Image (cartoon, coloured by chain):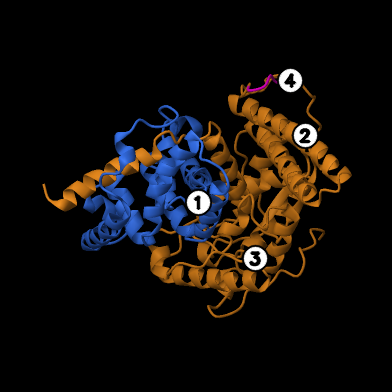
């Protein structure tokens, strides 16, 4: 089976995971492409049992590898796009995303990873710990601290959650 | 329901909402495979990489040195038509993979032509930034085209029956894989292939072989002969280094990291030895061989390979942790 056939259907979820793990600081597609390139080499040699699991781990590692080096870029891009004109419906939709990404960007890399794996990937504490290469106790404390930080950045009942999305379903 | 649970529920909702509508590009997996192939070729004889990598280097070098005959042009596809063209060559593709590679080669060739037009336009308009960007993108597209043509030939190679070992070029039956001098093995294999009538040359820094004969009908025979030459050397079976030797491999990667840094590059910061032992596939070259990295140009890659070879000259049996990386001064002469 060709690689592109074996992984079909996984792409959207992985790109979304990459975006959240990086706090929106990295080109999510580039992250997935680079991670999948590494997996492809191993897959070609017959060393991959579960492609979804391998790809998810590779995406996590690739985000870690890139670190925070593009954090500044995103803030610069945001400022540029917001300067001097009214927001379009698409930009308003993006603004909802940016609110979450801004909140995630306030977390340290380990906390953000723990939060995203627990609440976006719906992994258990044990699964999260295994993927992060740490103990369940550490995951619990990272998640608890991350939640406390996010509480200050995410209004639990923002107005936009009760309103129809501008510009359709997005 | 306590406050944390409300927050957790809210967070799940927000994370899903924030990613709604975000979709990957249709070509994402093809791009990933393309990068994987490139990485495989560039990492070629890295320690523990195994026969598949060595073979990729053997085949891959040929097209870089001697491009194949030009593929006939075809009618432009309709806008938005992503189906691979099928009439790229007078002879039919033998496999689906070959047809796909041919299509990718043609699309890359077209992209390069368009970028060349953009480059000329930027040059005429004295747009220096545009000129530089177009030139860089054009070179990338041309490399993609060469790579895709090479893959097309590789997919087309006619398989041949394994040949009996060819002896008389060396004997490594007493060596263990970890201490093996891969440069010497490559040199011996190259001499064996020369004697068998193949037109070849060594790839920098001397750990890979390029076939200069691009006849696809000879490629299968070339691969079989290379395997017979290696079999005749009585090489030990490839094996990952035992744990006590992992530290030596790791130490060499640290020395390599320093070598690359001294050469003005910015390699990825090394992980801990424990991280490497628990499965990290880091090498000092990792981020440098990205498609948009500083070594994207094969000439630059070859030059730095000579200065900072991916494994010690003489093999790990001759290198002591703490020693600097020894450059390869020049490729050995294949003439006896």
Whole-Å distance between the Cαs marked 1 and 2? 29 Å
Q: Residue at x 68, y 70 (%)?
A: B264
Q: Residue at x 55, y 72 (%)?
A: B317
Please tell me how crowded label 2 is: few (under 14), some (14-19), or many (20+) other residues with Cα within 10 Å. Answer: some
Q: Which chain is blue?
A: A
Region rendered in magenta = B75-80
Residue identifier under label 2: B114
Chain of the residue under the numbered disc 2 shown in the image: B
Residue identifier under label 3: B309
Quarter of the image containing the C terminus of chain B?
Answer: bottom right
Q: From what the image shows, is residue B336 above or below residue B55?
A: below
Q: From what the image shows, is residue B154 above or below residue B46?
A: above
Circle 4 sits in a helix, a strand or a loop, which is it?
loop
Please tell me how crowded label 3 is: few (under 14), some (14-19), or many (20+) other residues with Cα within 10 Å. Answer: many
Decide whether the magenta segment is chiefly helix, strand or loop.
loop
Circle 1 sits in a helix, a strand or a loop, which is it?
loop
Disc ID at residue A26 = 1
Whole-Å distance between the Cαs marked 2 and 4? 27 Å
Tag 3 and tag 1 share a subunit: no
Side of B6 relative to B83 (left or right): left
Residue A14, percent from left and from top: 42, 41
Residue B150, percent from left and from top: 69, 38
The part of the image, by quadrant, that contains residue A8 is top left
Q: From what the image shows, is residue B20 above or below residue B82?
A: below
Circle 3 sits in a helix, a strand or a loop, which is it?
loop
Residue identifier under label 4: B91
Chain of the residue under the numbered disc 4 shown in the image: B
Q: Mark 1 or mark 4, which is nearer to you?
A: 1
Q: Is residue B281 visible?
A: no
Q: Residue furthest bottom?
A: B322
Please tell me how crowded label 4 is: few (under 14), some (14-19), or many (20+) other residues with Cα within 10 Å. Answer: few
């Amino acid at each position: 089976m060709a690689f592109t056939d074996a992984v079909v259907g996984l792409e959207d979820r992985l790109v979304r995971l990459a975006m959240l793990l990086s706090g929106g600081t990295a080109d999510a597609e580039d992250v997935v492409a680079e991670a999948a390139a590494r997996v492809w080499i191993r897959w070609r040699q017959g060393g991959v049992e579960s492609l979804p699991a391998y790809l998810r781990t590779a995406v996590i590692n690739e985000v870690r590898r890139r670190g925070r080096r593009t954090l500044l870029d995103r803030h610069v891009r945001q400022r540029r796009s917001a300067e001097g004109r009214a927001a379009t419906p698409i930009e308003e939709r993006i603004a909802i995303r940016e609110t979450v990404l801004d909140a995630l960007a306030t977390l340290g890399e380990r906390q953000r990873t723990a939060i995203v794996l627990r609440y976006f990937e719906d992994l258990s504490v044990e699964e999260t710990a295994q993927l992060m290469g740490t103990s369940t106790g550490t995951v619990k404390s990272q998640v608890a601290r991350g939640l406390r930080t996010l509480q200050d950045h995410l209004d639990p009942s923002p107005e936009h959650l009760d309103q129809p999305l501008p510009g359709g379903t997005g | 329901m306590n406050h944390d649970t409300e927050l957790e529920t809210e967070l799940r909702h927000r994370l899903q909402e924030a990613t709604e509508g975000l979709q990957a590009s249709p070509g994402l997996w093809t791009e990933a495979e393309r990068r994987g192939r490139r990485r495989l070729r560039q990492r070629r004889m890295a320690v523990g990489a195994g026969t598949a990598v060595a073979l990729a280097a053997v085949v891959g070098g040929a097209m870089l040195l001697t491009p194949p005959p030009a593929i006939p042009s075809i009618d432009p596809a309709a806008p938005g038509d992503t189906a691979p063209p099928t009439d790229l060559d007078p002879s039919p593709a033998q496999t689906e993979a070959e047809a796909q590679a041919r299509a990718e080669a043609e699309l890359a060739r077209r992209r390069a032509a368009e970028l060349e037009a953009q480059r000329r336009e930027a040059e005429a308009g004295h747009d220096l930034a545009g000129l530089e960007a177009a030139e860089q993108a054009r070179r990338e597209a041309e490399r993609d085209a060469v790579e895709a043509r090479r893959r097309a030939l590789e997919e087309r190679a006619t398989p041949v029956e394994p040949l009996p070992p060819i002896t008389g070029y060396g004997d490594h039956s007493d060596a263990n894989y970890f201490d093996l001098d891969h440069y010497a093995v490559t040199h011996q294999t190259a001499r064996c292939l020369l004697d068998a009538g193949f037109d070849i040359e060594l790839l920098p820094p001397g750990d890979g072989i390029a076939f200069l004969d691009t006849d696809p009908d000879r490629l299968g025979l070339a691969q079989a002969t290379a395997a017979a030459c290696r079999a005749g050397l009585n090489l030990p079976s490839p094996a990952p280094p035992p744990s006590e030797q992992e530290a030596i491999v790791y130490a060499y990667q640290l020395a390599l990291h320093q070598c690359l840094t001294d050469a003005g590059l910015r390699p990825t910061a090394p992980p801990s030895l424990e991280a490497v032992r628990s499965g990290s596939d880091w090498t000092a070259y990792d981020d440098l061989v990205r498609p948009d990295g500083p070594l994207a140009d094969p000439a630059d890659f070859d030059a730095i390979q000579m200065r900072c070879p991916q494994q010690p000259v003489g093999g790990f049996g001759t290198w002591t942790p703490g020693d600097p990386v020894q450059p390869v001064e020049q490729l050995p002469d294949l003439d006896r």
